Image: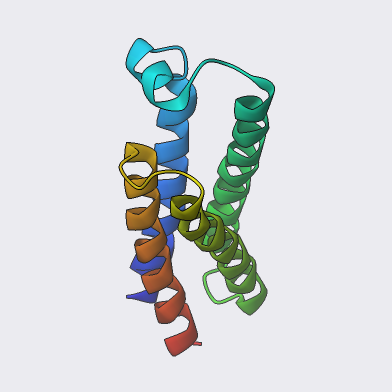
């Protein structure tokens, strides 16, 4: 199960963030995310970092599934995401669709981390 959840967590990051980047000029996207601004662009820089690290870690993991250090890097990335995703409802209204999807993804990443720790 650990293997499947690691692949799914990293793939979710790549797919969701890829969709965000691909649709960033779409009107409905702008309605939810707001117009381009320094603060939104800073957030996108963080998202781009997560996107790049997810791709790198996915390839590293596929190449060496038994590496503990790669799994620890994956856990670090997922923990960072879990923390920021679970903090956002306290600074943005929970009715925002971004917040709801963040909570769902955070829960999935928590499950992935549990599988990593249980099978180490």
- Name the residue: 54% across, 56% down: 81
The percent coordinates of residue 98 (x first, y second) are 38, 40
Front residue of 31 and 51: 31
* 63 lies above or below 39: below
* 79 lies above or below 120: above
The percent coordinates of residue 49 (x first, y second) are 65, 42
Q: What is the number of callouts on the image?
A: 0
* 11 lies above or below 41: below
Question: To which quarter of the image does residue 37 belong?
Answer: top right
Colour theme = rainbow
Image position of 66 (left or right of 112): right
Image position of 81 (left or right of 9): right
Quadrant of the drawing holding the N terminus: bottom left
- Name the residue: 62% across, 49% down: 53
Residue 119 appears in view: no
The percent coordinates of residue 30 (x first, y second) are 43, 17
- Name the residue: 36% across, 64% down: 107
- Name the residue: 59% across, 55% down: 57
The percent coordinates of residue 120 (x first, y second) are 51, 87
């Amino acid at each position: 199960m650990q293997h499947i959840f690691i692949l799914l967590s990293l793939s979710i990051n790549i797919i969701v963030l890829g969709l965000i980047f691909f649709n960033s000029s779409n009107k409905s996207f702008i309605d939810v995310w707001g117009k381009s601004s320094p603060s939104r662009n800073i957030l996108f820089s963080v998202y781009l970092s997560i996107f790049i690290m997810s791709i790198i870690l996915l390839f590293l993991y596929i190449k060496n599934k038994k590496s503990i250090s790669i799994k620890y890097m994956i856990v670090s990335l997922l923990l960072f995401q879990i923390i920021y995703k679970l903090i956002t409802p306290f600074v943005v209204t929970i009715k925002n669709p971004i917040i709801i999807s963040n909570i769902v993804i955070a829960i999935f990443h928590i499950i992935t981390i549990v599988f990593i720790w249980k099978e180490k």
